[in-house]
Image (cartoon, helix red, strand yellow):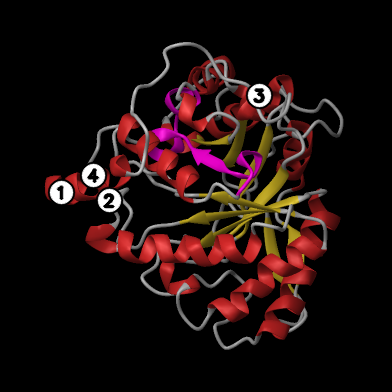
Amino acid sequence: MRKTPARTPRFSPPLRAAVVAIAIAATTGTTLATGSAHAAPSADTTQFKGVNWADPRDNFADDPVVLSGLSTSDSYAQTYAKASRIISAFRANLGANTVRLPINPYTVNGSYWKSYRGVIDAASAKGFKVIVSYWEGTGARKDGFIDDPTTFWPMWDTVVKAYKNDKHVYFEPMNEPHGYTDTEWADIAAKWLATYPSVPRDRVFVSGAGYNDHVTSVCADPRLKGTYLSLHHYGFWKDYATYDQWVADLKERIGDCAGRTVADEFGAPMTTGLDYDKPTPDNNFINYVQAVTDTFRELKMGSVYWPGLRTDDTYSLQTLTGDPARPWLATTNQSGADRLAWGWGRGKPVGH
């Protein structure tokens, strides 16, 4: 999750030139189509009903990402057991069938990968769809670029080799690639597809450009045909907007690409007592949550809430309970869970 959306690239010109040159060299052209959305991998994306499971640090890390409730000291078996319970709790409490997980080179290229695989394996064994997404590091390097191509590609080599034959696992090459222009990012996404042709395109999530904040440009690129598109959308992007304004804002970012798009991050405060089941026109976040969940349902879009679980995050829809060795989850805001289910095509017509 980001604190501010932006479409203006922030970058070091030499770094951008080097990274983009590598990407373009492996692609077969950069011309974007100017028409509407290409054929979708399915008629809609409602099969993705999910939540993000995050590191307490927000997944931006210069060391292994450690999901809330887990530890780098956990063995594969301990990680698998804990993850099995947390995944089961996501299903029991929320009706989820999808989880989005972060990776970075420190997690995959180092010793923690053996244990971290327990999360992916446990979720897959439970029949969950698993979206695995690369997150950049922190500090001055938190600029919306791939931190280091010499570790990025070996990371994906390892992940793809491990999971290309697991139909439950989906690959998202990069989270929030806001350092790149729309065209530069499409070039890199096209390189990823060209590098891993054994991965079915309908198991790839191409992030929207910028902060994943619009999918129209990647949707229009013929090189990315057949992939899913991931959109991020947050209520803190505006100090205040009406319900109708939020609907319009979201639809503009999607264009005519809803058939390929999954909102794999959206969220609002869940631990502050807001009632998302009750229309409250003067409250920006209530307007936002009701508007986006209504729109997801209307457009038959899948969605993945940020975050399902993240320790000490006011947006977290679940919180850890019980013995840390045998974790379970409790819902922090039932009205938020109601709206999430409504967006997934379930539940009763509460709210606006």
Instruction: Name the residue type under label 2.
Output: Asp
Circle 2 is placed at which residue position?
143
Does label 4 or label 3 sit earlier along the sequence? 4
Residue span colored magenta: 199-219
Q: Residues within 10 Å of mark 2 (few under 14, many from 20)?
A: many
Instruction: Name the residue type under label 3.
Output: Gly
Labels 2 and 1 touching (C-beta < 8 A): yes
Residue 53 in the image, given as x and y percentages of width and height? 62, 59
Labels 4 and 3 touching (C-beta < 8 A): no
Residue 340 in the image, given as x and y percentages of width and height? 72, 39
Numbered tag placed on residue 12 in the rendering: 1
Does label 1 or label 3 sit earlier along the sequence? 1
Numbered tag placed on residue 259 in the rendering: 3
Seen at 81% across and 30% down, the residue is: 345
Does label 4 or label 1 sit earlier along the sequence? 1
Residue 47 in the image, given as x and y percentages of width and height? 77, 38
Quote the CA–CA distance across marks 2 and 1: 9 Å
